[in-house]
């Protein structure tokens, strides 16, 4: 926090560095508002890095008659693919179908066809293929499944690196003038003289921030923030959140192709099995009501959740797995709006994935974000900033639908379908440009950084210029870039959020990286002392 004064004035203070907070900071900065975003931990360190990594309309939400949500999410799916083709990709899903007597909880074939027809046509679809039927006896997707699955339906959605999406939104916000502070908690906020007066506590001590508008984007902590930090009386606190825990497991690769599976379960739920990090399969998610104290430590999957996901795999795939096959797991708490009236709203899986923006204009404006999903973050941010801008006398139109995220401008500054459909061709040109780099390393960097790859490698002409290989696959040039440009401070930030290198490394790698980061900080301090 040393880069901002003890007293700081801004138009908008955003509390929360998940996808919604980062998206709002980005949109507001692009409309000329002076923005400060604070996050108590690392960016995307909680819910926003614990998703299923999907950009999707939500096929199952059609059963709950949430047509508006599905339509909105499907439209956003194509916008996000175009704007960030490096960290997203189209993904084809296979839904196996068996005779009814062999599979409990399966929807009738007519219902699946009708649902997929709606899914294909609820929103404009420019380049993703529509749904189709598959003969699993002839299609390679059938080889990994149990033999009683003879037919399937296929449809299109997309995948996203969720944690990097948050970082890129925050990076875009900073490049448009926002101040982004990680490891910085909003310790309290109150209305005072027509504006918000907030205390921020972080590594550099406490700072006082005056803001014309306060945005509560604290995710699962949103309701608590209103009660503990914003000094609002109870009658003006907007709650209604349901905290739902979702967990995932990562297994050794269950299938060789690049498609994903959507598996119907006897309880009516669905489970995804996604290709992940080349050598693995990601399986999830659970939906369990979260009960207990919401702390800042990382949540863990429960044995019952692991068993549920293992059973889902063994019910459908030919290869049997057990708990000992799980190479990694993660869990997050999703803040869902609970009073939507949707079908089956009493269950965790039936709670709406839509969002609600609760506003309070009695004094300085306050906007609180409840609910939402990764897919709709851009639209949520646009709606939020429309309200904020009008309240602050800055009625500037939204802009993010026509803008690339950092690194996404692979075929020009404007988002384009070409960037999605021809990303591999762009990568091939990078392989010619950086022929001295190992192809696997270059491919990872191209997907992580897109056109920002050139900035990271600006002074590199040969392998020796990459610096020390701190841990396998991570060179000094990348680690230094992530510290300087992307707020990385600890090994976990780099190995599990800015990348997924942690999956591929032996125990002890994080300790070596933390030692390197500590030495880098010590060298910077010595340099600062010498300069003074």
Image (spheres, grey):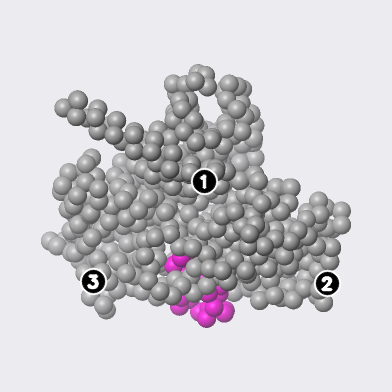
Residue sitting nearer the eye, 318 or 461: 318
Q: Does residue 211 show up?
A: no
- Numbered badge on residue 99: 2
Residue sitting nearer the eye, 152 or 245: 245
How far across and down, in percent of the image, does residue 496 sit?
A: 48, 48
- Numbered badge on residue 475: none
Q: Which residue lies at the image location 42% right of the left edge and 54% below the top edge?
A: 45
Q: Is the magenta stretch mostly helix, strand or loop?
A: loop
Q: Quadrant of the C terminus?
A: top left
Dot 3 falls on a residue whose secondary structure is loop
Magenta range is: 333-352
According to the image, label 1 marks what residue?
Answer: 507
Horizontal placement of 160 versus 498: left or right? right
Q: Does the magenta stretch include residue 335?
A: yes
Horizontal placement of 3 versus 246: left or right? left
Q: Which of the two labelled residues, at mark 1 and mark 3, occupies the earlier sequence position? A: 3
According to the image, label 3 marks what residue?
Answer: 232
Residue sitting nearer the eye, 286 or 71: 286
How far across and down, in percent of the image, does residue 198 sit?
A: 20, 58
User: Marks 2 and 3: which is nearer the front?
Assistant: 2
Q: Does residue 520 show up?
A: yes
Q: How far apart are marks 2 and 3 (CA)?
A: 57 Å
């Amino acid at each position: 926090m040393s880069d901002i004064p003890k007293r700081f004035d801004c138009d908008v203070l955003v509390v929360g560095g998940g996808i919604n907070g980062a998206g709002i900071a980005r949109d507001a900065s692009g409309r000329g508002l002076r923005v400060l975003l604070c996050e108590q931990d690392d960016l995307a360190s909680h819910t926003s890095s614990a998703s299923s990594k999907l950009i999707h309309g939500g096929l199952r939400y059609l059963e709950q008659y949430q047509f508006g949500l599905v339509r909105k999410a499907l439209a956003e799916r194509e916008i996000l693919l175009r704007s960030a083709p490096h960290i997203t990709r189209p993904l084809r899903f296979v839904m196996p179908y068996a005779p009814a007597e062999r599979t409990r909880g399966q929807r009738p074939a007519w219902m699946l066809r009708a649902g997929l027809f709606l899914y294909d046509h609820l929103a404009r679809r420019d380049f993703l293929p529509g749904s189709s039927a598959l003969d699993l006896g002839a299609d390679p997707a059938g080889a990994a499944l149990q033999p009683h699955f003879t037919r399937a339906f296929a449809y299109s959605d997309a995948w996203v690196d969720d944690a990097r999406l948050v970082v890129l939104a925050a990076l875009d916000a900073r490049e448009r003038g926002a101040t982004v502070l990680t490891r910085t908690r909003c310790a309290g906020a109150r209305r005072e003289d027509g504006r918000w007066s907030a205390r921020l506590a972080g590594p550099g001590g406490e700072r006082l921030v005056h803001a014309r508008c306060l945005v509560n984007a604290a995710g699962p902590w949103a309701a608590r923030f209103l009660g503990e930090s914003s000094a609002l009386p109870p009658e003006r606190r907007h709650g209604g959140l349901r905290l739902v825990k979702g967990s995932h497991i990562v297994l050794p690769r269950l299938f060789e192709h690049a498609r994903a599976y959507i598996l119907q379960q006897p309880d009516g739920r669905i489970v995804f099995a996604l290709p992940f990090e080349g050598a693995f399969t990601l399986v999830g998610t659970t939906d369990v009501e979260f009960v207990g104290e919401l702390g800042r430590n990382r949540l863990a999957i429960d044995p019952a959740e692991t068993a549920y996901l293992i059973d889902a795999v063994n019910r459908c795939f030919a290869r049997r797995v057990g708990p000992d096959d799980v190479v990694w797991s993660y869990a997050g708490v999703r803040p869902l709006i609970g009073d939507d009236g949707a079908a089956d709203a009493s269950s965790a899986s039936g709670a709406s994935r839509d969002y609600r923006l609760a506003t309070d204009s009695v004094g300085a404006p306050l906007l609180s974000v409840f609910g939402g999903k990764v897919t709709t973050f851009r639209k949520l941010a646009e709606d939020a900033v429309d309200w904020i801008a009008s309240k602050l006398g800055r009625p500037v139109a939204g802009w993010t639908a026509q803008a690339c995220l950092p690194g996404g401008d692979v075929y020009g500054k404007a988002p384009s379908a070409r960037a999605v459909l021809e990303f591999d061709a762009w990568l091939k040109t990078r392989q010619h440009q950086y022929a001295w780099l190992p192809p696997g390393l270059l491919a990872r960097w191209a997907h992580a950084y897109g056109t920002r790859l050139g900035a990271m490698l600006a002074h590199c002409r040969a392998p020796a210029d990459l610096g020390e290989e701190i841990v396998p696959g991570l060179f000094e040039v990348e680690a230094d870039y992530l510290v300087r440009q992307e707020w990385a401070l600890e090994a976990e930030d780099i190995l599990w959020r800015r990348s997924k290198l942690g999956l591929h490394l032996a125990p002890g790698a994080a300790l070596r990286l933390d030692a390197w980061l500590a030495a880098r900080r010590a060298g910077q301090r010595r340099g600062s002392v010498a300069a003074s």
